[in-house]
Image (cartoon, helix red, strand yellow):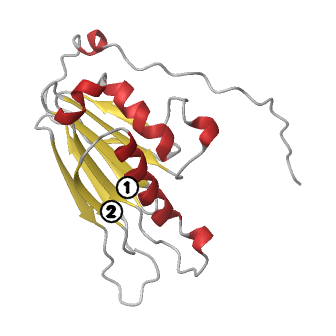
Amino acid sequence: MQAIFNLPLQQPVPVAPPHWADFSERTDNGPRAPLQVAMGQLKLGIRTEQLQALLGSCVGIGLIWKKRGRCALAHCLLPECPQMADEFGARYVNQAVPSLLRLIGATEADYADIEVVVAGGATMLNSCSSRLQIGQQNAEAARKHLRKHGLNVTYCRIGGKCGRTMTIDCATCTYSVQEIVTTTQGAAYA
């Protein structure tokens, strides 16, 4: 027996960047588990929070603005979609870069103070087709759109054949990128 659902399509609700006064009320104490940034998401971290993304062919773009104590991370699934460039979100790299800048409240005059961290873009499929090399396309789109916005990349670990975990510690305004390696010989995937 098969169930078929005909649900009405809903238009995405536009998400406005947060107002910084909203975060001044938080009184959380102590370290917590990292906030996971899933595919197509971007998140803003504050005070004691850590942002984390598990990346394969996706590209993680992190912004660290030490001067203002603001950090954000985008987990980009695909390289570009011209129709989505002005939409707030992170499904596409060309959408994520301006969205991250809006999220942290940066203007063009602030860009020199912002550290940019990029990771991911691995080749996760053993395919010869260049159309299926999404990781490489994501990495190229990240370089292109960060350059387009005049942002300088502080750290870049892209490509290869294994996944990575990117973590941004918002309390210390630091980051780490760790490769995910398998211990099983002959494993097809990392």
Other-residue count near label 1 (Cα within 10 Å), few / some / many at <14 / 14–19 / ≥20: many
Other-residue count near label 2 (Cα within 10 Å), few / some / many at <14 / 14–19 / ≥20: many
Residues tagged 1 and 2 counted as in contact (Cβ below 8 A):
yes
Q: Position of residue 95 (x, y in %)?
A: 50, 38
Q: Position of residue 162 (x, y in %)?
A: 37, 72
Say which label, 1 or 2, has the lower sequence index.
1
Q: Quadrant of residue 165?
A: bottom left
**Above or below: residue 139 compared with residue 15:** below
Residue, far right: 1
Q: Residue visible at 52% across and 45% down?
A: 92
**Horizontal relation, residue 19 to residue 6: left or right:** left
Question: Please, what secondary structure does the residue beneath circle 1 have?
Answer: strand
**Horizontal relation, residue 67 to residue 96: left or right:** left
Q: Position of residue 161 (x, y in %)?
A: 39, 75
Residue, far bottom: 186
Q: Position of residue 75 (x, y in %)?
A: 42, 46
Quarter of the figure that contains the N terminus: bottom right
For this rendering, which residue is in front, 189 or 107?
107
Residue wearing tag 1: 54
| Amino acid type, mark 2 | Arg
Q: Residue visible at 37% across and 17% down?
A: 18
Residue 90 visible, this orientation: no
Q: Residue visible at 24% across and 25% down?
A: 109
Instruction: Please give the label number shown on residue 164.
Output: 2
**Horizontal relation, residue 89 to residue 51: left or right:** right
Residue 174 visible, this orientation: yes
Question: Please, what secondary structure does the residue beneath circle 2 have?
Answer: strand
**Above or below: residue 60 compared with residue 96:** below
